[in-house]
Image (cartoon, rainbow, N blue to C red):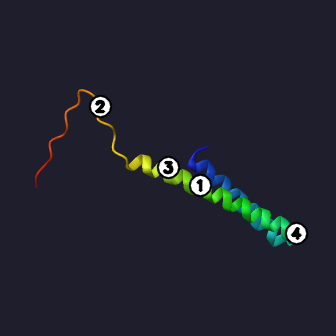
Amino acid sequence: MSVTDVLEELRLRLHAAVSELRAGDVEPAETLAMIEECARLATEAASQVDVQVRAALEPLPDLPGQLPLAATQA
């Protein structure tokens, strides 16, 4: 699942939870279960975002046969 998919799932679940809570037909135990599920999804989304950011910031490995670029001087 990509970060976008996780965030979209989180958005949809949060929207559904808000709609149910506003309707007032939700039992306290069900409310707690919805909150816990949304928290789980938020944790998963944050983890995926972190992995992608770290991957984007890590330098590429040196490939055999490549020479380093000369540093420019200002």
Q: Which mark is residue 27?
A: 4
Q: Secondary structure at mark 3?
A: helix
> 55 left or right of 3?
left
Marks 4 and 1, the one that precedes in the sequence = 4
Q: What residue is pinned by disc 3?
A: 51
Crowding at dot 3, Cα within 10 Å, few <14 / some 14-19 / many 20+, comes out as few
Q: What residue is pinned by disc 2?
A: 63
On screen, residue 46 above or below 68: below
Crowding at dot 1, Cα within 10 Å, few <14 / some 14-19 / many 20+, comes out as many
Marks 1 and 2, the one that precedes in the sequence = 1
Residue at image location 56% in from the left, 57% down from the top: 46
x, y (%) of residue 19? 78, 66
Mark 1 and 2 residues: CB-CB less than 8 Å, in contact? no
- Dot 4 amino acid type: Glu
Q: What residue is pinned by disc 1?
A: 45
- Dot 1 amino acid type: Ala
Give the quarter of the figure containing the N terminus: top right
